[in-house]
Amino acid sequence: MNAAPPRVDPRRLRLVVITDAALAAPRDLLDVVERALRAGAPAVQLRDKHLGSGDLLALAKKLRALTAEYEALFFVNDRVDVALLAGADGAHLGPDDLPVSAARRKVPSGFLLGASTDDPDLARALVADGADYIGCGAVWATGSKADAGDVIGLAGLERVVRAVSVPVIGIGGITPERADEVAAVGAGIAVIGAVMGAPDPGAAVRALLAPFRSGRTLRACTDPTAA
């Protein structure tokens, strides 16, 4: 059975840089993000579990303006409402957030929704509910994301990649040295510490994107019933 084409160009999800102000410190978060964008980061996700709604929206608007300048995608973690008010391209939803099916009914056409799971069957269900991509991990152990869940390894990541017809983005413990292994199973890369905490965020982004420069892209499964 042939799958419908993804609603987002997989090349734009080769690398998602996720923000973390504490890891970026003492540098300004916006400066770190701009250095990543200047180096070619195709997507940025705002993630901050501590800011109140007003401050989160203010930061989201600044990041929207910055990502627009570099023609990069911009997502907001958890908060569909903030993403819409900031003019973001989409939102990423975790297991405890608004269900994808409910969010899809509330957002305009073209608004992108990502969802997190490491289970192939749940990934299929999330795509059926309207998810445009799947975030999958933790691929390796990570200290950057306390709610990352159990380590699934490359084999677990590949099972999800093979299960769905939308882009799958691996997260958790991914470094420039491990980027090629993630790309080899057909997944994109999402990182927090590897860029936010890097002495040279631009160099980190270029290294993380290197496996895709030979024309390699995210896998598009042609039979989403196959695990």
Image: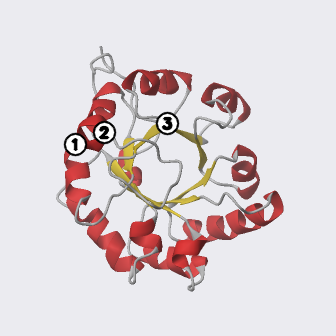
Vertical placement of residue 29 versus 49, above or below: below
Q: Is residue 129 left or right of residue 173?
A: right
**What amino acid is at disc 3?**
Asp
Asked whether, in this view, residue 125 is left or right of residue 156, the answer is right
- Residue 30 seen in this snapshot: yes
Disc 3 marks which residue?
Answer: 132
- Considering only order in the chain, which callout, 2 or 3, is on the residue closer to the N terminus? 3
Residue ID at (31%, 39%): 157
Which residue is labeled 2 in the image?
A: 157
Q: Which amino acid does label 2 sit on?
A: Leu
User: Where residue 84 appears, x then y in whole percent?
Assistant: 72, 49
Q: How far apart are marks 3 and 1 (CA)?
A: 19 Å
Against 130, residue 198 (above or below) is: below
Q: Which residue lies furthest to the right in this view?
A: 54
Marks 3 and 1, the one that precedes in the sequence: 3
Given residues 108 and 188, the one toward you in this image is: 188
Q: Residues within 10 Å of mark 2 (few under 14, many from 20)?
A: many
- Residue 46: % across, % down: 60, 60
Q: Are marks 2 and 1 in contact (CB under 8 Å)?
A: yes
Residue 186 in sight: no
